[in-house]
Amino acid sequence: MTLDELKQLAELPLMQLVEKAHAVHAQHWDTSRIQVCTLLSIKTGGCSENCAYCAQSARYAAVARQELLPREKVLERALLAKAMGATRFCMGAAWRGIRADDARFAEVVEMVRAVSALGLEVCATLGKIGSAEALALKEAGLTAYNHNLDTSPEHYSEIVTTHTYADRLETIDAVQQAGISLCCGGILGLGEGQVDRLRLLEVVSSFPTPPESFPINVLIPIPGTPLGDAAPQAPDTLDLVRMVALARLALPRTRVRLSAGREHLSPEAQMLCFYAGANSLFYGDKLLTANNASIAEDRRLLEACGLQPELPHADMLRPAAGAGEELFSEEEPHPCFREVCSES
């Protein structure tokens, strides 16, 4: 979708825009279903990049550093995520990038293989990777690779200077060339203008293959980071709803995911986002370093909205043969609302 087309949509009255987006959402998706994802930081802090919003940069000392988690610990968390009802397990490592000859990359590949064997969709975000790394991750069973563009090309250098927008696009190309689904979104509240948000959507919607998912984050100001100590004015809730609706119209067959900042949204605001086209969320009390809405709150929200979690999509699973058995049979009811979550 072009910038001019997006500008025309953005100028619509909000309710008209939301109705238009809802119609497109209903055309392409089951509006009674939502994708439920759980996110785990498998390596925290110590990143050499200078992203102004990020607690994991070594330059800001805003979060305690943690080396790569043992595979057994990651599998424990993946099993717990599945028991709570998540259908996608996302693993994030705070690296500028990783190469195939690094022993840590080999360990991450084995994590992907083992989590995939549980019958979960698997997503990873490891920073910059090339073709060799993307192909190895695909072979291990990776469902999707997250590599956010954050904002527009024009505003990007205001947020980070240790890499370029072109660097991000290079990794995205390697991921898509390997046949891995792309997860690529942005952050609201970085001091960007409305045109920057529209330019982000223009860039992402112009990819030869649209991303499988588009996460929308709202800046969480973290003390010790440049945007934590002097954060620009936060977007209001209706800005978020408008962005959800625009994303749904620009990316009709892409999952639009409510991501960071959701814990500060009221149930009513989240319901409006779902109506406007959001059909994925992060589920669990913690994201990479920031807090998230509680499991109990999310259970009540999904019940109130009449939403049921999607099951993992068979065509997105590539479990490694012999790596393990599924925790639940296909005949067993989906465990999202089991008592195992009731005290969480």
Image (cartoon, rainbow, N blue to C red):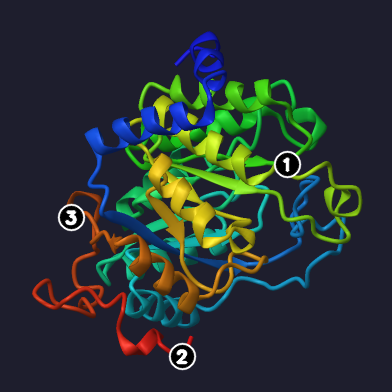
Residue 147 in sight from this viewpoint = yes
What is the three-letter code of the residue carrying label 2? Glu
Q: Given contact means CB atoms under 8 Å apart, are the residues at marks 2 and 1 in contact? A: no
Q: Residue at x 33, y 80 (%)?
A: 83
Q: Residue at x 76, y 47 (%)?
A: 49
Foreground label between 2 and 3: 2
What is the three-letter code of the residue carrying label 3? Ala
For marks 3 and 1, give the CA distance.
36 Å
Q: Label 1 belongs to which residue?
A: 189
> Outermost residue, top direction?
4
Q: Position of residue 250 (x, y in %)?
A: 43, 25
For marks 2 and 3, give the CA distance.
31 Å
Going from N to C along the chain, the mark reached first, 2 or 1, is 1
Going from N to C along the chain, the mark reached first, 3 or 1, is 1
Q: Position of residue 208 (x, y in %)?
A: 38, 21
Going from N to C along the chain, the mark reached first, 2 or 3, is 3
Q: Position of residue 260 (x, y in %)?
A: 60, 55
Image: 23 above or below 333 = above
Q: Quadrant of residue 176?
A: top left
Relative to residue 110, is residue 226 drawn left or right?
Answer: right
Please name whichever residue, 279 or 105, is drawn nearer the observer in this view of the structure.
279
Q: Label 3 belongs to which residue?
A: 314
Image: 339 above or below 42 = below
Relative to residue 233, is residue 184 drawn left or right?
Answer: left
Q: In the rendered image, which quarter contains the N terminus? A: top left
Q: Secondary structure at mark 2?
A: loop
For marks 2 and 1, give the CA distance.
33 Å
Query: Circle 1: is it few (<14), some (14-19), or many (20+) Cα within 10 Å?
Result: many
Q: Label 2 belongs to which residue?
A: 343
